[in-house]
Image: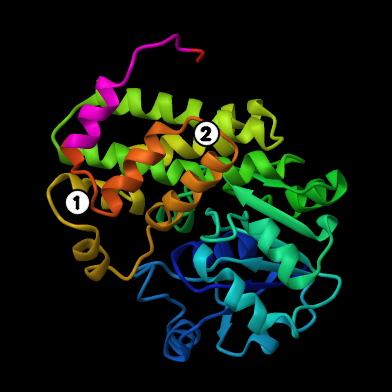
Amino acid sequence: MTKVAVFGAGSWGTAFSIVLADAGHDITIWGRREDLCTTINDKHENTDYLPGVELPPLLRATHDPAEAASDADLVVLAVPSQTLRSNLEDWAGVLPDAAVLLSLMKGVELGSLRRMSEVIAEVTGATSDRIAVLTGPNLAREIAAREPAASVVACEEEKVAARLREMLHGPTFRPYSSVDVVGCELGGAYKNVIALAVGMAVGLGFGDNTTASLITRGLAETARLAEKLGADPLTLMGLAGLGDLVATCSSPLSRNRTFGEKLGKGLSTEEITASTRQVAEGVKSCGSLLALAQRNEIYAPLVQAVHAVIIGELSTQEMMESFVSRETKSERD
């Protein structure tokens, strides 16, 4: 049994805690809200984010970060990507010096344009052999229901990735290992923006030809940027790229696809944001991904168009028209 601290009591942090508990580990969840932590401990249910899902009896929650992190061998970070830096600055003094820090987040930081692993390294001073990321087609509600799923855990140190792979393997959860942290992180962040575009198309009433075209061209766009930043483009053909992309773009459980559908039906970004407590990471990350692509001179028409819709410069109908009306060229270009 390994002592694990999971920082984040939202749907994904809670669902992943179930994976860890099923794999035989001792889990403590840190939650931002003390009342939610009390509910998790008393009712063995996260009534706000995963209502109706019974949590393992030994899983416990606390509002005290020092209590959560005490003696942890693995620290899992499952907070919204744009709050990671400020949270880590608060937690840095209590995180165990030898613990591996595993990011579940899928985003690129606004302003700095850093990936989550880079933010972790910068704030905590952890070396690359202590920083890992997990990504793949992992919709929280299905993971919590213990439906079979696979994922990728990546660390630049291959031995650490392999150790995490074995540690996370459970009755219904199969992890694979990788050393391509860049490819895994960019695949996870970019697919949220593509899912927004797919959702917009669905909201406008378009069918499978349109959504398949957006998914395919979005994947090509992701691979262009990832390869420029040193990733293996084959990573984007696996669970961290295509697998995560298919799940996020296809499922009504996807926050980003659902957000996009509402945009396609005429609601504004502000109206949708005000109506939900869940975070659609692509809404925040599309601006930083666009800036990252521009800084690296990568052609990124899809993320550019989605960003324009999010900030109100384009309507969803105009975005779809721009997708078709661009200059024709070779598919490889």
Secondary structure of the residue carrying tag 1 is helix
Q: Disc 1 marks which amino acid?
A: Lys
Foreground: 51 or 293? 293
Q: Disc 2 marks which amino acid?
A: Thr
Against 229, residue 333 (above or below) is above
Q: Quadrant of the N terminus?
A: bottom right
Q: Mark 1, residues whose alpha carbon is within 10 Å: few (<14), some, or many (≥20)?
A: many
Tell me residue 4's x, y (percent). 70, 71
Kindly tell me whether residue 248 is visible in this rendering. yes
In this image, 68 relative to 13: left or right? right
Q: What residue sits 34% from the left and 54% below the top?
A: 255
Residue under circle 2?
A: 222
Against 61, residue 321 (above or below) is above
Tell me residue 227's x, y (percent). 65, 30
Q: Is residue 283 magenta?
A: no
Residue under circle 1?
A: 262
- Give the mark nearest the N terminus, 1 or 2: 2
Q: Nearer the viewer, mark 1 or mark 2?
A: 2
In this image, 77 relative to 264: left or right? right
Q: Mark 2, residues whose alpha carbon is within 10 Å: few (<14), some, or many (≥20)?
A: many
Q: Which mark is residue 52?
A: none
Kindly tell me whether residue 58 is visible in this rendering. no
Distance, label 1 to label 2, CA atoms, is 24 Å
Q: What residue sits 84% from the left and 44% below the top?
A: 158
Tell me residue 61's x, y (percent). 56, 82
Q: What residue sits 53% from the left and 53% below the top?
A: 106
Q: Is residue 327 magenta?
A: yes
Against 19, residue 70 (above or below) is below
Tell me residue 303's x, y (percent). 40, 40
Foreground: 220 or 203? 220
Residues rendered magenta in the picture: 318-331
